Image (cartoon, rainbow, N blue to C red):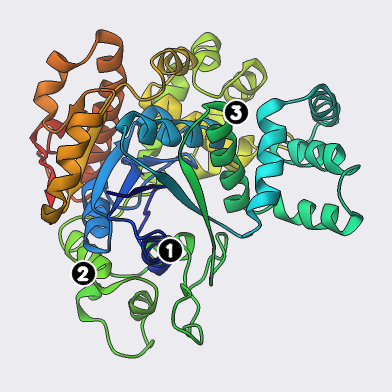
Amino acid sequence: MKIIGIIAEYNPFHNGHAYQIETIRRQTGADYIVAAMSGDFVQRGAPAVIDKYARTSMALSCGVDLVLELPALWATASAEAFAGAGVMLFEKMGCVDGICFGAESDNLPFLLQIADLLAQEPAAYCNALSSYLKEGISFPAARGKAVCDCLAENVRPETIKELEVLLREPNNILATEYLKALRRHHSSLTPYLIRRKGAGYHEDAVRTAPSADHTAPTASATAIRNLLTAEGVDPNTIHNLPADNTTAYAALATSMPQAALATLADYLSHSPFLTENDFSAALGYLLLTATKEHLMATGDCNGEIANRLLKNRHQFSSFAEFCTLNKSRDVTYTRIQRILIHLLLNIGNDDYRMGKSLGYIPYLRILGFRRDATGLLSTLKKSAAVPVIAKLADAAALLSPDAHAVLQKDVFAADLYEQTLSLKKNKTTPRSEYTRGIVLI
């Protein structure tokens, strides 16, 4: 039995995700594909546009056999922690053979060389990184410059130019983090790299025509989210997609697999999508009541950023605008966004220390699976190094107090998302996370 893992957000699921699944299954002959998927909040520091159960249904209907939830603690963390937790989730399963990820580059040896440098952190790299950070540039930019400096003596000048471009692409950065995590954890998982095709990660508009071979996605997840949240777009019209591209939603038909689009249509028929600004009222309250000590203890924050947030909190108007107000040359918009999500979810630096002490993944929570994947579930129950949670009510008896505390972060995140969703659609009774069942297809 061959099992391949994919770390994903599927926010939402699109043709690029389907292409990755189809390609890795064909290349490896995998019997099963497992997705370690973020829950209701994602790595860039924002709510998922639709909830984790709908996204699980999308994944299962489009080729994934089993979806496990990546704990909220790690799903909203930095790229390094996000990747490390994803790798450890597959390690804790005890039956996964390899991990597949996409990138803008398909040069695996080159990415491995970068990952080795980042995993080892030699003195030359640390000194260069420190020097660039003192210049006041952001950490991602400083790290890229430090890597180029350290590899310059061993590669051709044109390769360094390629490296400079490579390290600016988000999926390449995440790919090196996966590879670094594999190295640091001495993982036996085989890495499989698939080059991203079609629309780029940051492309914010849907392409109007498919690729010549009809395999490349015409839209990134960013573009699809922008389409969904565009002012004046009626979610109910998704039920009546025309054959051409005369309406905004018609573009989704060229961007998403039919099964995923059907799930999206069903979801939007009874629930609105969420954005970070839907959490503005709660965030504004927390900022007004926060102390410097509390902000400093919030995940990914420090004293300098805490002072900035406190200084600017009376100018708060919305989640997104507050991120723009507080970003700077050395602190990215995304970092501010993650800090604010951590404040909302009550995730602190102490939680990260505890999570690492538990080996990152102290449980495996099933969000959904295909009915014909019972062989995979039987194998998982025998091989898993940590408790497998199929029914949330059983978790307290299966987990240590610290592990259960990590799980409660997932429950709180889901309940906050559901409560906000209910308020937006004027529903008075939000569903408790304890009442939600596993998705079966």
The answer to whether residue 318 is visible is no
Name the residue that disc number 3 marks: 312
Q: How many marks?
A: 3
C-alpha span from label 2 to label 3 = 43 Å
Mark 2 against mark 1, which lies toward the viewer? Answer: 1
Residue 334 at x, y percent in the picture: 57, 40
Looking at the image, is 321 positioned above or below residue 209? above
Name the residue that disc number 1 marks: 27
Ranked by sequence position, the earlier of labels 2 and 3 is 2
Residue at the location (54% across, 40% down)?
A: 178
- Crowdedness near tag 1: few (<14), some (14–19) or many (≥20) residues, C-alpha within 10 Å: few
Residue 234 at x, y percent in the picture: 28, 70
Residue type highlighted by circle 1: Gln
Name the residue that disc number 2 marks: 262
In the visual, does 313 lie left or right of 415?
right
Q: Which mark is residue 159?
A: none
Residue type highlighted by circle 2: Ala
Residue closest to the eye, 67 or 98: 98
Q: Say which quarter of the image contains residue 389.
A: top left
